[in-house]
Image (spheres, rainbow, N blue to C red):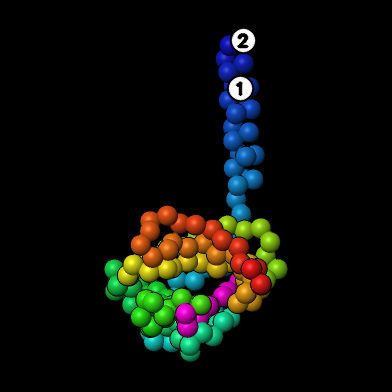
């Protein structure tokens, strides 16, 4: 009797484990490791959404691992690379995405503002997650036109 009960319990636990693991699997909507782009070119899967000061993003060798390629958002000095000081905003993805998880690697080559804009509508309406110059905290902001 105990063997039968233990077997049923193991089957139920296994079934529940498989059921919950299926729920957490999601479809990958976008991936870019920049390996298919040429060094010095604009990233092929991204587009400039706000042209500030003419700065263009380029694909460069990863400073930490020369076997990899990464996107450099600007060649401008740190103070003028921000979108509100002459830098550009690059976007990717589908504007119809409403519920997703974003994951990325980010490097701060200098102590300046660096962030990710999402749900971008235009240069005056978007969400922003960033780390501000001189800080270590990562914050989330919502920018609305006129505010």
Q: Quadrant of the C terminus?
A: bottom right
Looking at the image, which residue is at 70% across and 68% down?
96
Residue 138 drawn at (x, y percent): 45, 56
Residue 81 drawn at (x, y percent): 43, 78
Quick one: which residue is furthest to the bottom in this view?
54
Q: Which mark is residue 1?
A: 2
Give the crowd class for mark 1: few <14, some 14-19, many >=20 residues within 10 Å. few
Question: Would you say residue 101 is visible in this rendering?
Answer: yes
Which residue range is magenta in the image?
85-93
Question: Would you say residue 42 is visible in this rendering?
Answer: no
Q: Which residue is mark 1?
A: 9
Give the crowd class for mark 2: few <14, some 14-19, many >=20 residues within 10 Å. few
Q: Quadrant of the N terminus?
A: top right
Does label 1 or label 2 sit earlier along the sequence? Answer: 2
Left or right: residue 17 versus residue 64 is right
Name the image quarter holding residue 113: bottom left
């Amino acid at each position: 009797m105990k063997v039968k009960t233990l077997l049923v319990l193991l089957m139920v636990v296994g079934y529940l484990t498989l059921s919950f693991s299926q729920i957490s699997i999601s479809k990958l909507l976008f991936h870019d490791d920049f390996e298919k782009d040429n060094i010095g070119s604009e990233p092929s899967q991204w587009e400039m959404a706000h042209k500030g000061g003419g700065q263009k993003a380029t694909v460069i060798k990863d400073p930490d691992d020369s076997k990899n390629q990464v996107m450099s958002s600007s060649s401008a000095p740190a103070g003028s690379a921000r979108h509100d000081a002459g830098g550009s905003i690059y976007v990717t993805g589908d504007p119809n995405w409403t519920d997703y998880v974003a994951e990325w690697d980010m490097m701060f080559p200098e102590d300046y503002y660096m962030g990710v804009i999402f749900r971008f509508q235009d240069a005056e309406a978007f969400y922003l997650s960033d780390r501000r110059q001189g800080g270590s905290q990562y914050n989330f902001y919502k920018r609305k036109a006129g505010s």
